[in-house]
Image (spheres, grey):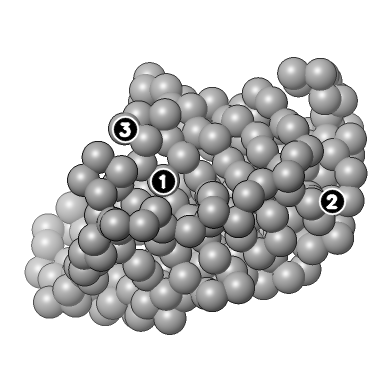
């Protein structure tokens, strides 16, 4: 559960960190590999709007920071669902409630099983003794990835590397919207219990556009192409004729 939570949170934070690099329209492609499974995504960005399209089924997500909403769209079914940032915060509260309930049940588990669960959940457990110590280290390592001159940052939690990022200064106007977007990423991190607040804050110390991101054996993503271009407003709207479906919120019971 801790590993899954970390993946969800870091993907959200890194996506937003990538998006802040531009004050104009831009499109980039990313290849991600997780558990031997490869996915290619196409991302479109203009100020306060982000769209990510999967090459599998064409489903896409629209992040509208200006509306504080996230749209999940399924073209094959011609349906879409909407989640507000307030919904995300509520989801975080419900997940905390679920984990608190699990913590109560753990008291009745055999000692060895309980210790294993505590290790898995770590700082995500309600009432954990402390937040993990997060460090951002500029390693000094350099290499060229897909034509971009990059340098490596290591983000560690309690001394263990959580994320390795190769970033480039070559994508201009990186700092133009960084603070605004990172404030939103911190709010999104609230959907995952524990541990991610410090990670989100640490990401702000990274100076450059992430070209390659690696989370141990969990995930590796690489930006393969970046284009500065005009992106039509229609890219960030749900197509006409699609039916809204309700998104089920998790139960705390």
Where is residue 33? Give x, y as percent.
46, 25
Rendering quarter of residue 133 = bottom right
Task: Name which of mark 2 and mark 1 comes first in the sequence.
Answer: 1
Task: Please state which of residues 109 and 154 is positioned toward the viewer in this rendering.
Answer: 154
Instruction: Tell me, yes or no, if residue 194 can be seen here.
Output: no
Distance between the alpha carbons at the discs numbered 2 and 1:
25 Å
Q: Is residue 70 left or right of residue 202?
A: left
Name the front one of labels 3 and 2: 3
Which residue is painted at 41% across and 46% down in the image?
Answer: 60
**Dot 1: few (<14), some (14–19), or many (≥20) neighbours within 10 Å?**
many
Question: Which SS class for mark 2?
Answer: loop
Tell me the quarter of the image containing the C terminus. Answer: bottom left
Left or right: residue 190 versus residue 90 is: right
Image height of 22 relative to 93, above or below: above
**Between 159 and 134, which is closer to the camera in this rendering?**
134
Q: CA distance from mark 3 to mark 2?
A: 32 Å
- Residue wearing tag 2: 174
| Residue located 65% across and 35% down the image | 28
Picture coordinates of residue 250, whole percent (x, y): 21, 69
Query: Residue 7: which numbered mark, if any?
Result: none
Residue under numbered circle 1: 60
Q: Which residue is mark 3?
A: 57
Cα distance in 3D space between marks 3 and 1: 9 Å
SS of the residue under disc 3: loop
Comparing 143 with 175, the one in front is: 175
């Amino acid at each position: 559960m801790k590993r899954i939570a970390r993946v969800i949170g870091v993907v959200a934070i890194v996506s937003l960190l990538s998006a802040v690099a531009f004050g104009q329209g831009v499109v980039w492609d990313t290849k991600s590999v997780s558990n031997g499974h490869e996915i290619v995504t196409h991302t479109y960005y203009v100020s306060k709007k982000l769209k990510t399209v999967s090459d599998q089924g064409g489903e896409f997500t629209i992040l509208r920071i200006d509306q504080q909403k996230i749209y999940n769209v399924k073209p094959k079914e011609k349906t879409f669902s909407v989640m507000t940032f307030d919904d995300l915060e509520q989801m975080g509260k419900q997940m905390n409630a679920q984990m608190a309930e699990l913590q109560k049940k753990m008291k009745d588990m055999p000692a060895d099983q309980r210790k294993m669960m505590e290790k898995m959940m770590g700082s995500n457990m309600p009432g954990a003794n402390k937040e993990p110590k997060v460090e951002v280290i500029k390693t000094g390592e350099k290499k060229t990835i897909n034509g971009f001159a990059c340098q490596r940052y290591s983000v560690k939690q309690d001394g263990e590397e959580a994320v390795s990022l190769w970033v480039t200064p070559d994508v201009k106007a990186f700092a133009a919207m960084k603070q605004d977007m990172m404030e939103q990423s911190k709010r999104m991190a609230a959907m995952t219990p524990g541990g991610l607040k410090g990670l989100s804050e640490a990401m702000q110390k990274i100076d450059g556009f992430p070209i390659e991101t690696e989370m141990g054996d969990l995930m590796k993503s690489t930006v393969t192409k970046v284009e500065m271009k005009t992106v039509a407003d229609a890219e960030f709207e749900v197509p006409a004729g699609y039916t809204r479906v309700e998104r089920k919120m998790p139960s705390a019971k």
